[in-house]
Amino acid sequence: MTEGNAAYRPEDPDHTLIRRMAAGETEALDELYARYGPGILNFLVARLNNRQLAEEVLQDVMLAAWRAAPNFREESKVLTWLLTIARNRAINTQRKLRPTLVELNEEVKLQVTDTGPLEKVSRLDKYEALREGLEQLPEMQREVLVLVFFHQLSGAEVAEMLNISVGTVKSRLHRAKEMLRRVLPSEENL
Amino acid sequence: MQSDWQDLIPFYVAGTLNEVDKRRLEAILAESDEARATLQEWQLIGDFVRSEAATWSRGMPPLSDVVRTTINHDVQQSDRATRPNNPPVVIDEVPPAEPPQKVVPFPTSDVHEPRREKMAQSGRSVRIPFTLVAAGLMIILFGGLLFAALLREPDDNLTAAQLLETMTRAVSSTPDGSSTPEPDLGILSVPDEPHTPTPQAEPTDADTVVQRPQPSWTPPPNRCVARAANADVNVYQQAAETVVIDTLPHNEYRSVSVYSDADGGWYELIRLEGGILGWVRADAVILSGPCSDLAAPSPSPTLAETEVVTAGECTVTAIAGVDAAIYETPSRSSAVIQTVADFVAIDVLSTTASGWYRVTYNASDSIWVGYMNEADASFSMACQQLDILPVPSETPAVSAAMDTSTGVEPSLQTFDYTGDEPIRPGETINLTWTAVDAAGVTILFYRGDVDPNDYGVLDPLATFGNLGVSDSVQVVIPQGYTQPNAVYVLFMDALHDDNERVFGGIVTVPVEVE
């Protein structure tokens, strides 16, 4: 039974942090920011592809978390809760900036470096190419890569956070890899 | 179609694969060159993403002054509303020897009780001689009365602190025997205004939170601004959604950016400091300023890529750049109830002969059932196999010949569900019903823990409207739903009164959650 399982669920120490915020402890917000701020920031950068904008939205996310703390139901990990807030705020921001982002999105097709004979490239070159490729990926693929590899969320957790199926998570990963593969000028591509 | 092991590799590289899949994959890796090559590819990507993402958060700024100011304000508001009128004041340190007139006078209330206790417990007596000297001077000044008091038989229980307070009280007494009025310590104050609640997660039906007096308010020129009509107004994450993210206080205003006519009218508000605040119902706010030419919102997230999503046997392919709107009815003139951002959770339920598809879309907190036009998206061949349903009739208009004054109450004959049990999140159930003497049916979806008294009062997780009086609808239990029960409440629209909604019945669906 679900309720029985809930009784045995180990206490998440992060939940205590949120309860302290709900009780009005401003220091708890500082702790939350120190603990999760960097992770949320790099997720926002992945989502918005703009560091300055991501920093602004990060502040908005922390304020939203502070105010939403009394309503946190402790049914999810604090990280995924914060990431969900961050994603919603990022989407709102993108809507406001839509004209610019539409242009970017229209240019989403990656430029394939089809420059003739393939050359051996160093790992540094690969990273440089991957960096360009990552920037050009659609935001929905880039965010899945960051959630899986940086935040180490499982497929089910990513699916729940993004409100998509696990199959879609996998297909986005697969597509991201295929697009990144195309930007690498090497004999083995990747 | 890629192999199962290909799906597992990225999670293997990330270290999030479960043990069973991990062992299975490692067995494949031991035998397959292709699998090992794919692993190398993912390792390069994984290493790169980790190192690259780590650089994005370097030099993270501190929490901004705006955030700090806001949360401190929240705390102050909360404190003011919760503190008692005469709270105890704890003074940890007694001031060092000071002139008597600077000693905090002993008030008539018990606010200094903690101080007295603390001194008694710690046995501090270093200031007694000084105080005694001061008291002695006062004794000389006030003569025999106080002197006699000191000469009386000592009380074994009288502590140094109590003695100090006795002296202090004597010093601060006025000649007529009344106490010196207690000065304002400036530490705590009596609440002078009502507590402003934090934004509520559950919006109320009236969309208001706290009634307040009418503010004196002057809208700024040259800007279209909105203020709450009568009380604090809930601010929603999206138009026509139920997720409350903030509150627009009654005595404040916000700039309005755009107007959406979806679901009866919504305004998108801008923060004073910039950035989107959220959406408010049009009927809950009053506009001022140049608001006559508000623009419609820009198409909500257009699709950046072509993505194929499988919905049962029917696949949906988004068309880049097309606004993927879900309409309330299969008509371009009907309201847009939701705009699909990712276009990845669309389930096609059925199709109509006129080029419309009935779909259900899992938004972040709601399920929307509506119609998409075939011109807005590309549907797979499998969708052609869907049953073609007649276009549902619009809510029957009351004909002139119909007697609208009879007041015949609609009634519900059946309301039930079917589904493959156990029913889990992500699975589909089929709701069927038969209503009599009704103009239409609306079904509200609530979490299992909602008090039945709140059905129809609290905003539901989703609303399925414009349904026929005898019909069925397929509903997907949302992914991530964690309640043991999902509740569907059916309301019927009365024939005789467009605004009257009559309670029909409830179906509780047991949901098995992990």
Image: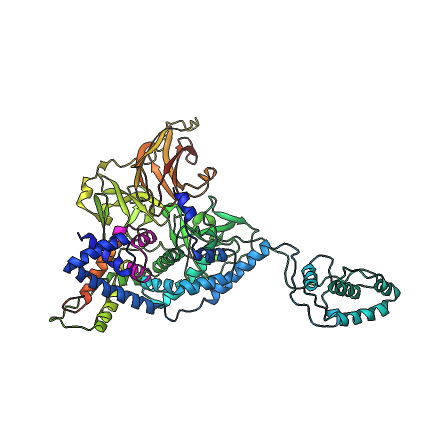
Identify the main secondary structure in magenta: helix
Relative vertical location of residue B136 with respect to residue B510 in this rendering, above or below: below
Closer-to-camera residue (B14/B305): B14
Residue B288 visible here: no
Q: Residue furthest front?
A: B156
Asked whether B94 falls inside the magenta stretch, the response is no
For the rendered model, the colour scheme is rainbow
Residue A153 percent coordinates (x, y): 32, 57
Residue B302 percent coordinates (x, y): 28, 55
Residue B348 percent coordinates (x, y): 25, 43
Q: Residue furthest left?
A: A117
In the displayed structure, does residue B196 sit left or right of residue B277? right
In the displayed structure, does residue B114 sit left or right of residue B354? right
Relative vertical location of residue B408 with respect to residue A115 in this rendering, above or below: above
Closer-to-camera residue (B302/B346): B346
Residue A136 percent coordinates (x, y): 25, 64
In the displayed structure, does residue B504 sit left or right of residue A156? right
Q: Which image quarter: residue B293?
A: bottom left
Asked whether A167 falls inside the magenta stretch, the response is yes
Relative vertical location of residue B469 with respect to residue B279 in this rendering, above or below: above
Q: Which residues are magenta?
A: A142-168
